[in-house]
Image (cartoon, helix red, strand yellow):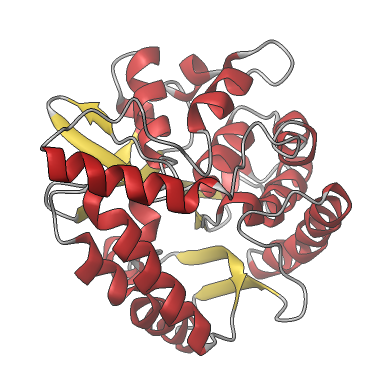
Amino acid sequence: MDKDKKQKFILYLGGGAMAGVFGAGIVTALEKADVYKRIKAVYAASAGVLNAAYFLTKNTKSGSTIYWEDLTAGRFIRPYNVWRSFARHQWGRHLGSADRSHLANVVDIDYLWRVLEGKRKYLDMAALRHSPVPFYTQLLNTDTCETGYVRVDHLGSKRAVSETLKASVSVIPYYSHTQNIHGKNYADGYIVTPINLKYLLKKYPKDKIVVAMNVPLTRRWVYHVQSWLEGVFAQPMCKGPILACLSKRESVIRQEFALALKTKRVLLINTPDDKQAFLLSTNQKHLKKYYQLGKKVAQKILRFIK
C-alpha cells in the first residue's frame, strides 16, 4: 500500500534534558525510514522539542551529536550552581528584585542556543514554519502554572519560532530565566504536564499514537522526592503555584503511563529500567550508547505503524 494511503499516526517526543539523547536515536531511525508521510502530527516537550525540530528539518544526525559533542564540556551543565541559584533567588525575593541577570544556571540554555544558531549544528527554524507535518510544542505559563500546546508551523516569523522553542526548553529550576512572549512568561511545560495523553486521545479518536519517553516505565519513590525538590527550587522563579503542581507530577506520570499501557492504539516507548541516561549526564560514552539504544528501540515503532 502507498505510504500516503496508510493510516497516519501521532508522534509524541518527551523530554529529560541529557536523557533526550535516547529520543534523538529514535528520530534518527525514523528519519532514515522516511516515515514523514505517515505522521499526522508531532507533539513534543522539553528536549523532545529539539529532537523533533531536527527530525522535521531532516537533520537528525547533526542534531543528535550535540548531546555528546557540545553539551559535555562543562559549558552547558554546571551542577554546582544548584544551591547558588536557589540562594540568589531567595535573596532577590527578599530585596524585592525581579532582575535575574545575576542568577547562576545549572543548565545554560543561552549557550545551547548559540550552538543551534551556529554553522556546525545549525537548526533551520525558518524551515519549521513550512513543515508539511504539523508540529506542536508544550509551554508552561509560569504566572498561572497552566500548560498548553503551541503550533510551531503556524508561527509568523523565524524569531517567533526561536522564542517559542527556547521557552519550550527553558527548564526551571535548572535554568533561571523564563521567556516573555506577548507579555506572558513561559517555560518548559514538561516539568508540570508530561504527555497530556487524554488530550491527544480526545483530539485524535481514531489514530494510533506513539509516545516516546526518555524515562523508565518503573517509577521509584525517589522520583516523588525529586519532583518536590524541583518545586521548592522553582517556586521563587514563578508567580504561579509551581510547587503544588510539581508535587503532583510523579502521580500524573504514573497515571499517564497506566492509560497508555491499557489503550491498544497507543505505543509507549520507555528507556529500559536498567539502562537510562541521567538528566545531567556528561559521559560521552554513555550518551552514545543511549543514542544507539534509541535507534534500536525505534524498530518497535516501525512495526507498530505498519
Residue under the image location 29 percent in, 75 percent down: 247
Residue 45 seen in this snapshot: no
Q: Quadrant of residue 183?
A: top left
Q: Quadrant of residue 216?
A: bottom right
Between 301 and 194, the one lying in front of the other is 194
Residue 296 seen in this snapshot: yes
Q: Quadrant of residue 233?
A: bottom left
Q: Is residue 73 left or right of residue 223?
A: right
Q: Is residue 177 left or right of residue 258?
A: left
Between 52 and 225, the one lying in front of the other is 225
Determine whether 226 is above or below 149 in the image. below
**Residue 33 position within the rendered picture, expressed as x and y whole percent measured from the top left:** 76, 46
Looking at this view, name the residue that lies furthest to the right. Answer: 285
Total labels: the figure holds: 0
Between 148 and 127, the one lying in front of the other is 148
Between 173 and 207, the one lying in front of the other is 173
**Residue 30 position within the rendered picture, expressed as x and y whole percent measured from the top left:** 71, 48
Q: Is residue 242 left or right of residue 12?
A: left
Residue under the image location 52 percent in, 55 percent down: 15
Quadrant containing the N terminus is bottom right
Residue under the image location 84 percent in, 57 percent down: 286
Q: Is residue 271 left or right of residue 147?
A: right
**Residue 134 position within the rendered picture, expressed as x and y whole percent measured from the top left:** 41, 38
Quadrant containing the C terminus is bottom right
**Residue 57 position within the rendered picture, expressed as x and y whole percent measured from the top left:** 61, 27
Determine whether 305 is above or below 240 in the image. below
Residue under the image location 41 percent in, 76 percent down: 253
Looking at this view, name the residue that lies furthest to the top. Answer: 119
